[in-house]
Image: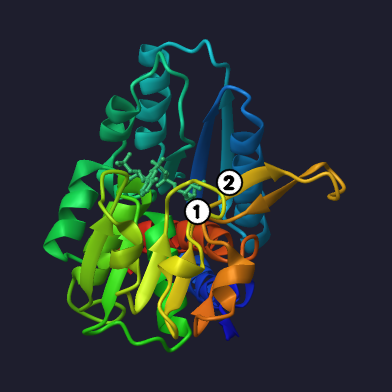
Amino acid sequence: MKLIEGASIAEIVYRECLASLAELKETGHQPGLAVVLVGDDPASKAYVGAKDRKSRELGLHSVKIEKPASISQEELLAVIDQLNADPAIHGILVQMPLPRHLSSDEVIRRIDPAKDVDGLHPVNLGKLVMGDPSGFVPCTPAGCQRMLIESGIETAGKHVVIVGRSLLVGKSLALLMANKGNGGDATVTIAHSRTVDLAAITRTADILVGAVGIPHYLGRDHVREGAVVIDVGINRIVDASAKKGTRLVGDVDFDAVSERCAAITPVPGGVGKMTIAMLMANTVRACRQRAKI
Ligand code: NAP
């Protein structure tokens, strides 16, 4: 069984970013990323902190905007308008989920598609549907595809079963892998909470992707011998033996599944590492596209 580690593949992406940053610097350009956090959800805070740290480490111009959970829709839209107009900012990410009284849909639609490095604006999702590479692809699906490519796993003609149909992960990844080209050309099945006899379907997968959000949901019976397994899930469970009393696990029961699959991503240390890397790559590309380099 091969372990597909996110850190080493993310490093490849970071090296590409650094080369691109050096080239941009020569022509007086510096990619800028703004991350907007509303409220004080600890997990969201941790994600935003990690994105900010990585941006700075690479040499991007990083702006972290923190707003109270009580912010109104109009005030939040005004923040987006300001970032859209700011020439030092090439990428805008609003950390989801937003507090219930805010419309994330309206906020995403307000972001300039050319700065939508999270790839969730309808223009970018439309480009994904059309297979137009000028758009931005949501970072987690882009990261999953990159992991497969860098690991030398053939996707053309393979049956990919994705469990989960969120725009952020499952549905976008399905489109990406069904599109033509490197890391694509797959035959894709999307499964979800209304799927009947899930295990019978997942057992037909050459590549199985778990994006469900239920700890250890996909077990031994869901996986065909020799399949490749990509675990997108990040779930915190109680574990008295862990230092903090909790630990992170995926949607896949790693111990049970790793015995029969050909390759698998760990949690933590798998897809999660790639999400930030692809965000950096998208921001650098947004800067190149604006600078027409
Ligand atoms: P989500 O929006 O809650 O979507 C979950 C999907 O799973 C839905 O399509 C849902 O089906 C499906 N589902 C729920 N219960 C199911 C069941 N019993 N059987 C089959 N399908 C079921 O979650 P998400 O944002 O896609 O995230 C999924 C997981 O990935 C979470 O653990 C999240 O933390 C993780 N994640 C990780 C990263 C990363 O960087 N690694 C990034 C984003 C998300 P319905 O549509 O029918 O409800």
Q: Judge by depth and name the residue closer to the eye, 32 or 39.
A: 39
| Residue occupying the point 23% across, 51% down | 124
The x, y position of residue 38, in whole percent, is 53, 24
Q: Quadrant of the C terminus?
A: bottom left
Drawn side of residue 252 relative to residue 159, left or right: right
Judged left or right of residue 235, residue 105 is left
- The residue depicted at 32 percent of the width and 34 percent of the height is 108
Residue, far left = 130
**Which residue is under mark 1?**
217
Q: Is mark 1 within 8 Å of ligand 1?
A: yes
- Between marks 2 and 1 in the image, the one whose residue lies nearer the viewer: 1
Residue type marked 2 = Ser
Colouring scheme, one of rainbow, by chain, secondary structure, one colour: rainbow
Q: Residue at point 52% right, 81% down?
A: 260
- Image quadrant assignment for residue 42: top right
Check mark 2 vs ligand 1: CB closer than 8 Å? yes or no: no
Please tell me which of labels 2 and 1 falls first in the chain. 2
Image position, residue 74 (x, y; %):
36, 13
SS of the residue at dot 2? strand
Residue 238 percent coordinates (x, y): 73, 41
With 106 as the anchor, is 7 left or right in this view?
Answer: right
Q: Residue at x 17, y 77 (%)?
A: 180
> Which one is nearer the viewer's eye here, 253 or 13?
253
Q: Amino acid at mark 1?
A: Tyr
CA distance separating discs 2 and 1: 37 Å
Where 56 sits versus 76, above or below? below
**Mark 2 = which residue?**
62
* 137 versus 244 height, above or below: below
